Amino acid sequence: MQVGVPDILVRQARKDDLPALVAIFAADALGGHGDTTDPEAFVDYVRAFTAIEASPNQTLYIAERGGEVVGTFQTMLTISLTGRGSSAMIIEAVQTRSDMRGQGIGARMIEFAIAEAKGRGVRLVQLTSNAIRKDAHRFYERLGFKPSHLGFKMALK
């Protein structure tokens, strides 16, 4: 599904989008994920893209304006025994290129993800956001998300 409003196109990512996506992640000073545009690391991104692309429950999207990648997000569908076998869509890795923030791109991407979830009959859409991203938290709340859980992580590498 491709949606453009008014000049923002959201579509499934292709392998040739990877350099632009990697650049967006590498420019994120707050994320702390160790992303880099070092050519030697590109094989890691290709490996991850291939796994995401092959998964029936994951989709990587890009937002495009004027033929340029200006944002990205990933969705994952999960089924749980709780809620009588309910489904949830998790939205992850939401990023808008830093020079394009405040132009409705992030909102368009989230609207797209919610529409996809509704179209699939998903019960719940959820996402996590780094605790230090206060602007992002306000953004998600403006879109109708409510803070509801406390998350925990354990780094294994």
Image (tube, rainbow, N blue to C red):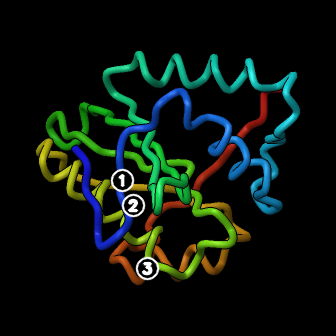
Residue 109, labelled with which disc? 2
Q: Earlier in the sequence, mark 1 or mark 3?
A: 1
Going by the numbered disc 3, the residue's amino acid type is: Glu
Q: Nearer the viewer, mark 2 or mark 3?
A: 2
- The location of residue 52, given as percent across then percent down, is 48, 24
Which residue is rendered at x = 68% and y = 26% of the image? Answer: 45
Judge from the rendering whether residue 70 lies leftward or rightward of residue 140; answer left or right: right
Query: Residue 99 sits in which quadrant?
Result: bottom right
- Find numbered disc 3 in the image and state the secondary structure of the residue it sits on: helix
Measured along the vertical axis of the image, is residue 34 above or below residue 104? above
- Find numbered disc 1 in the image and state the secondary structure of the residue it sits on: strand
- The location of residue 108, given as percent across then percent down, is 36, 67
As measured in the structure, the alpha-carbon distance from the residue carrying label 1 to the one carrying label 2 is 7 Å
> Mark 1 touching mark 3, by CB under 8 A?
no
Q: Residues within 10 Å of mark 3 (few under 14, many from 20)?
A: few
Q: Earlier in the sequence, mark 2 or mark 3?
A: 2
Q: Nearer the viewer, residue 149 or 65?
A: 65
Residue 38, labelled with which disc? none
Q: Nearer the viewer, residue 140 or 150?
A: 140
Q: Residues within 10 Å of mark 1 (few under 14, many from 20)?
A: many
Query: Residue 110 sits in which quadrant?
Result: bottom left
As measured in the structure, the alpha-carbon distance from the residue carrying label 2 to the one carrying label 3 is 15 Å
Residue 10, labelled with which disc? 1
Going by the numbered disc 1, the residue's amino acid type is: Val
> In the rendered image, which residue does mark 3 sit on?
141
Measured along the vertical axis of the image, is residue 122 above or below residue 99? above
As measured in the structure, the alpha-carbon distance from the residue carrying label 1 to the one carrying label 3 is 22 Å
> Mark 1 touching mark 2, by CB under 8 A?
yes
- Find numbered disc 2 in the image and state the secondary structure of the residue it sits on: helix
Q: Residue furthest front?
A: 66
Measured along the vertical axis of the image, is residue 76 above or below residue 66? above
Q: Earlier in the sequence, mark 1 or mark 2?
A: 1
